[in-house]
Image: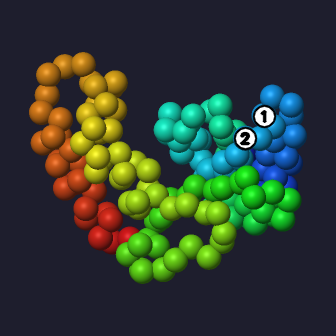
Amino acid sequence: MNLKSSLDKNNVVNSIRLKLKHQIEAGKVGIIVEGETDKKLFKKLINESFAVFEIAHGIANLLKAVSELLKETKKIIGIRDADFIHLEEKKEKTQNIFLTDCHDAEMMLLQSDGAYKSVMAEFFTEKMNIISFRQNILKSISFIGGIR
């Protein structure tokens, strides 16, 4: 068992509490995300002068932490992967939880031409047809997605 897997919602709640009570962070919105890659992405999309971020290390911790903190402040939101919620035509029941437009943030990036090209330009320097590469990625994962 590693340290991250032993974290629970109380660690997340207390960390956000401390951050939001700090003089420099006062007035900011607390944003809790599922995992490390989500934090990396949303820190690029949301101006940090308005928000503090925390990683919940899982959906259960995220939902519990947001519910707990909403008892104290309205300046808290959670961002989670939609997973299969959209496909199953369900709604998120917890207040102040925002869902990704697609299954997860990575699929949102693949769907957006601008975001996809930016990511590809960061990691691939050689000339390649990145649009057909995206089509190949989607084709190769469609079977596994269908099974799930």
| Nearer-the-camera pick, 7 or 12 | 12
> Residue 32 at x, y = what percent?
67, 50
| Nearer-the-camera pick, 95 or 50 | 50
> Residue 15 at x, y = what percent?
82, 43
Instruction: Give the CA distance from mark 1 to mark 2.
Output: 6 Å
From the image, tell me which residue sits under label 1. 25
- Residue 78, quarter of picture: bottom right
User: Circle 2: is it few (<14), some (14-19), or many (20+) Cα within 10 Å?
Assistant: some
From the image, tell me which residue sits under label 2. 28
Q: Residue at x 46, y 58 (%)?
A: 100
**Quarter of the image with the C terminus in it:** bottom left
Q: Is residue 105 above or below residue 81?
A: above
Horizontal relation, residue 101 to residue 22: left or right = left
User: Circle 1: is it few (<14), some (14-19), or many (20+) Cα within 10 Å?
Assistant: some
> Residue 66 at x, y = what percent?
73, 60
Q: Which mark is residue 60?
A: none
- Residue 94, quarter of picture: bottom right
Q: Residue at x 78, y 62 (%)?
A: 70
Q: Amino acid at mark 2?
A: Lys
Q: Amino acid at mark 1?
A: Glu
Q: Residue at x 86, y 31 (%)?
A: 23
| Residue 136 in view here | yes
- Quick one: SS at disc 1? loop
Q: Are marks 1 and 2 in contact (CB under 8 Å)?
A: yes
Horizontal relation, residue 130 to residue 83: left or right = left
| Nearer-the-camera pick, 71 or 58 | 71
**Colour option used:** rainbow
| Residue 60 in view here | no
